[in-house]
Amino acid sequence: MKTEEAKRPRPSRTARAAEPRIVNATINYSVPTNERLHIDVRDFSRTNMRFTPHTMPVRDAREVADALSLEREGFVLAEHRSAVAGSRDLELLGRDYHAEMQDMLKQFTGARDVLPQRTGLLIRFGERSTAQGSAKPARFAHLDYTTEWAHRFVDLVTGWERVSLEPYRRFAIYQTWRATSTPPQDNTLAICDGRSVGDGDTVEFDVTIGPEEIPGNTFVSRVVRHGDGHKWYYFPRLRRDEVIVFKAFDSDTPDALNAAHTAFDDPDAPADAEPRASIEARFIAFFD
């Protein structure tokens, strides 16, 4: 079985920028509080999250794309052509896009089985867009899984998919993010090197995304507090045949904080840039 490192996705053909570049961008961090934090995407009157903006250096990751690793930094950029990315038909995407990405993740991680987390399929449009998607960009630094809820989602996903898996040694949760708007993106994804985030930098919060009696509609994630040592990266000028893959959880390294992320406005984007559009999806990979 090839390792994840050995089968890392092929870097994009435009992996290196002409010159190294850093932008100073606004990253929204959680305000410290003694309250139990909660976000309810249906009823924001039940949301008590508060954020404070910090100007942070965000490095052009194309400069180092061929050296990035899912095992170290927690994210990579890969080339992958999709026949359906850009569609707004969630039924079509739930069938075909999930299948495309399952095949891709099997190939470069060496996973025996890959299952989609169907509640994680989201189409997002920036605030300047007139289009309506699943949600607006998430403009605060966060991680989508805790150790407990990573394990719970294994049970939920295998139940939703009605599969009984053979015994496995390890599982990992991967998130995929693809821009479907024409580059350059006015708003895009920033990802933090997981090694630069300490456990004391994160706080658990409760999330409600639908009727609470339905399993999977309430869960626990982590929000990030500011740290001067956080190392943020982004990939400018993303094409539709490029996809960011980042690790959300790995049962072999459950304490790793790969990879905090947030939407942010690229200060170098022209004022008339096409509003950001993107598709994201989540998967659980199982290894012998």
Image (cartoon, helix red, strand yellow):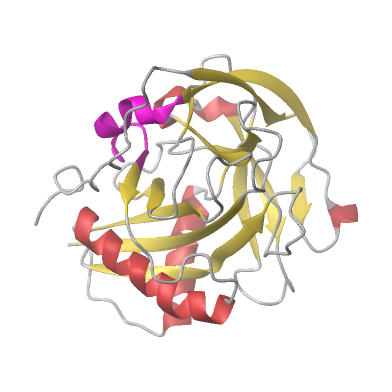
Taking the view exactly as shown, the residue that stands out farthest to the bottom is 162
Count of numbered badges drawn on the protein: 0
- In the image, the segment drawn in magenta is 60-76
Is 231 magenta? The answer is no
Q: Position of residue 138 (x, y in %)?
A: 67, 46
Where's the C terminus, which quadrant?
A: bottom left
Residue 3 is left or right of residue 197, and the answer is: left
Q: Which residue appears at 67% of the width and 38% of the height? A: 140
Say above or below: 154 vs 58. Answer: below
22 or 221, which is in the foreground? Answer: 22
- Residue sitting at the far left: 1
Q: Is residue 185 left or right of residue 48?
A: left
Q: In the current view of this chain or complex, which residue is farthest to the right?
A: 45
Q: Residue at x 38, y 43 (%)?
A: 254
Is residue 32 something one can see in this rendering? no
Q: Position of residue 90 (x, y in %)?
A: 57, 76
State the image quarter where residue 265 is shown.
top right
Taking the spot 32% from the left edge, 47% from the top edge, the residue there is 78
Q: Horizontal and vertical percent for residue 65?
A: 32, 32
Q: Quadrant of the N terminus?
A: bottom left
Vertical arrangement, residue 270 with respect to residue 213, above or below = above
User: Does residue 147 appear to the left or right of 32 in the view shown?
Assistant: left
- Can see residue 109? yes
Query: In screen coordinates, is 40 left or right of 268?
Result: right
Magenta highlight on residue 68: yes
Q: Give the residue at the far front of this rendering.
A: 272
Compared with residue 166, is residue 10 higher up or lower down, i.e. above or below? above
